Image (tube, rainbow, N blue to C red):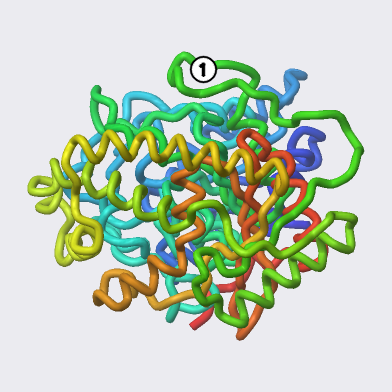
Amino acid sequence: MGSEWWKQDAAAVGAAVRAGDVTAAEVIDSHLERIAAVNPAVNAVTQLLADRAREEAAALDRRRATGEELGPLAGVPFTVKETTAIEGLPTTFGAVRFKDHVAPRDAPPVARLRAAGAIPVGHSNMPTLILAGVHPRSELFGDTWNPWDRGISPGGTSGGDGAAVAAGMVPIGLGNDSGGSVRLPAAFCGTAGLKPTTGRFPADHRLGPDDPALCSQVFVVDGPLARTVRDLWLSFEALAGPGADPADPRAVPVPTRLGGPGGRPPRVGVVARAGGRDTHPDVRAAVDAAASALSDSGYAVEEVQDVPRFQEALDAYSSMVMTEFSGSWPVVRTLLGKDGHRYIEMSMDKSAPVELAEYLRLTGVRLNIQRAWAEFQREYPLLLGPVFAQPPVAPGAESASAEGHEFFGRALGLCSVTSFVGVPAVAVPGGVFGGLPQGVQVIGRFFREDQCLDAAAVIEERVGVLTPVEPRG
């Protein structure tokens, strides 16, 4: 295999390091060489930790030499979105204002991946403060490009991780998702991605000592991107961990697999046109291919007209988020760099902030919609639909005009609604159409990531693994 360990998935790397077939140092050097070769064309990895990663790999190899049993992700390199703390490194959020904001400790998901043996090799790019748009263009680090085609966005806001994974720079990227920010890069870059149930993984998204308001607490969840579904499984198990984490009292230590082995696969409802919105023929073809794979594997698959209360959920989601943004917006606006204000201001024009009484009412609406979803998912434990109802778009299309903003929001609607409800979802490629990957998502019941991952693995077996790719265009 020589120095081409960067082509292997995390499961293969971890097994080889544990068995002594390769050293962690060799694995890290292979990936650092790959980063040096392709990151100039992609600009996904921002703060590279080359020396530190080599030191951690050498320490891991010494531990193995003494007979210590290593974790399942032993020697596996991973990137971490600029929102998420790596001890001793600035957590910049892509903003000049935070370029010296050095993290005193690892965020909980970083600590859990490390505990499983994985090694962070750097931060990854994103839109400034996650607010300057969806395409990963930051004030500090510029644009990240999609390795499939520079003319389309890698998606976001975890687009740095999506592009890094797709181009072979790392097998795993750690992003976060509050409305599609893991699933969209997975779809646009041809990888897999997991948005967990709200409260599944411990997290810490604070900029300082104070915690954020409700929406940032309940809609934002950390999640991995990977080239294979089995790597998502390994990441999922590491991030869920063995028990409660005092760093985050919200996290619920639910077992990663519920129920016994075997049995009939859960029923799948195919929702190809969520909210009655148009779905591009290429995206519909990807959904149909995924549905066929599941049906052939014994899943009972049938088309459903829609998910519960789609538009009401989308309206409540937008109103709550925009209301929370509005209080700090006059200050935050100044931190976003040139034109970084456009995306949120267009969002506010579309969904104006509401008064306190209405905001409080909407918190009850959310619970009521969650009840409706729980009842619906008794009949359809799994849902299959598009990640983005249209083909990948040009970089910055969501901020370029009011029309582009509206188009983008409509195509991403199913992601926004599932984040609002809090259910898990796994994005996986449904195939390549028009020369570009088209992603689908499998949506499950609360804390049933296992069923989502099992179904995604069936789809992946039919479609195949699409990455790593050489940067093009």
> Depth check: 241 or 30 in front?
241
Looking at the image, which residue is at 35% across and 35% down?
Answer: 363
Q: Is residue 236 left or right of residue 403?
A: right
Residue 6 in picture, x, y percent from top left = 65, 56
Looking at the image, which residue is at 74% across and 43% down?
Answer: 451
Looking at numbered disc 1 in the image, what kind of residue is underneath it?
Asp
Judge the density around disc 1: few (<14), some (14-19), many (≥20) Cα neighbours within 10 Å: some
**Which quadrant would residue 103 be assigned to in this image?**
top left
Q: Is residue 288 left or right of residue 306?
A: right
Q: Is residue 46 visible?
A: yes
Residue under label 1, please give it. 245
**Which quadrant would residue 348 be assigned to in this image?**
bottom left
Can you say which quadrant of the picture contains the N terminus? bottom right
Residue 223 in picture, x, y percent from top left = 53, 43
Residue 151 in picture, x, y percent from top left = 43, 81
Residue 413 in picture, x, y percent from top left = 46, 61
SS state under label 1: loop
> Depth check: 159 or 23 in front?
159
Looking at the image, which residue is at 70% across and 54% down?
Answer: 228
Image position of 343 with respect to 18: above or below: below
Q: Is residue 247 left or right of residue 241?
A: left
> Depth check: 177 or 208 in front?
177
Image position of 94 with respect to 20: above or below: below
Q: Is residue 54 visible?
A: no
